[in-house]
Image: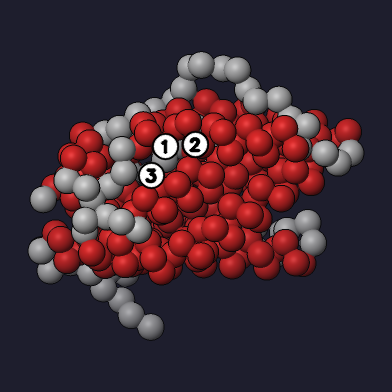
């Protein structure tokens, strides 16, 4: 039961933390259309997180509500990827972070459509159109910047080089992921690696970018060991509920 809850929380935490990061762009996007696009993507992944938090509460069976998992867990209890807690940086860093994540999660959600857990499969079915759009959006921007001006090319290449070390965590299974894969609930994430690289290489080629060659990768986010950025983010995210617990509008 704990493995199932942990896996669901992993999916939920990814959505919540990414939504918080993307929300920081609201009112700061390079042009109005992209500002709104990122806000909509933030709302999409937040909606996915809510579905998973609600299901986690059901699986947990402790009478908790979805807000508990977002507002009253400490940093070490979060299971999101290290990649998505990294600061936005410039537009290129935000786009490259989004592309690396979207490329992976599109494969995950596609696999979850056939999950043996009907509730997870139903959430994936509802989310897959959004996930496909997110990948299309970030892919097009990677190509646009990579095959654009000298300055845009340099910025998106720098972003890829700087963020590459956080992508290896995608494919290193935790205990809860391994158990869920053995039961047909989750995909074998190691098996997604070739497809992730193949699609990434295609986009990088079209964008005239070089795939980073670094072979050392950060890890730990999925088991609660995070960078300093998550704690800072949670301080902001959780302040109101912790200061006035149980309060309502």
User: In the rendered structure, are the residues bearing label 1 and label 3 in contact, judged by CB atoms less than 8 Å apart?
Assistant: no
- State how far apart marks 2 and 1 are (Cα): 6 Å
Q: Is residue 163 left or right of residue 159?
A: left
Nearest to N terminus: mark 2 or mark 3: 3
Please give the residue where the numbered disc 3 appears in the rendered image: 80
| Image quadrant in which the C terminus is located | bottom left
Callout 1: SS: helix
Please give the residue where the numbered disc 1 appears in the rendered image: 192
Badge 2 density bin: few <14, some 14–19, many ≥20, Cα 10 Å? few
In depth, the one of 135 and 161 nearer the eye is 135
In this rendering, the label closer to the viewer, 1 or 3: 1
In depth, the one of 232 and 156 nearer the eye is 156
**Rendered view: 76 above or below 123:** above
> Which quarter of the figure has residue 228?
top left
Residue at coordinates 13% horizontally, 47% vertically from top-left? 2
Q: Is residue 166 left or right of residue 14?
A: right
* Image location (x, y in percent) of residue 150: 88, 33
**Rendered view: 136 above or below 142:** below
**Residue 195 circle label:** 2
Callout 2: SS: helix
* Image location (x, y in percent) of residue 165: 52, 26
Q: Is residue 2 left or right of residue 34?
A: left
User: In the rendered structure, are the residues bearing label 2 and label 1 in contact, judged by CB atoms less than 8 Å apart?
Assistant: yes
Callout 3: SS: loop
**Rendered view: 83 above or below 123:** above
């Amino acid at each position: 039961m704990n493995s199932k809850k942990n896996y669901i929380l992993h999916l939920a935490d990814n959505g919540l933390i990414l939504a918080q990061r993307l929300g920081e762009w609201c009112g700061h996007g390079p042009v109005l259309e992209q500002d709104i696009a990122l806000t909509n993507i933030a709302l999409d992944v937040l909606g996915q997180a809510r579905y998973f938090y609600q299901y986690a509460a059901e699986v947990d069976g402790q009478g908790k509500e979805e807000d508990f998992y977002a507002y009253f867990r400490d940093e070490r209890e979060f299971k999101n990827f290290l990649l998505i807690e990294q600061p936005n940086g410039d537009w290129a860093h935000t786009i490259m972070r989004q592309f690396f994540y979207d490329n992976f999660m599109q494969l995950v959600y596609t696999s979850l459509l056939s999950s043996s857990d009907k509730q997870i499969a139903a959430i994936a079915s509802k989310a897959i159109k959004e996930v496909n759009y997110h990948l299309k959006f970030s892919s097009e921007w990677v190509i646009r910047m990579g095959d654009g001006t000298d300055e845009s090319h340099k910025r998106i290449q720098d972003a890829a080089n700087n963020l590459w070390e956080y992508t290896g965590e995608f494919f290193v299974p935790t205990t809860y992921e391994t158990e869920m894969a053995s039961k047909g609930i989750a995909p074998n994430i190691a098996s997604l690696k070739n497809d992730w690289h193949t699609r990434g290489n295609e986009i990088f080629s079209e964008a005239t970018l070089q795939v980073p060659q670094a072979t050392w990768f950060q890890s730990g986010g999925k088991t609660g060991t995070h960078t300093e950025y998550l704690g800072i983010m949670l301080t902001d995210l959780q302040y109101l509920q912790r200061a006035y617990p149980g309060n309502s509008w």
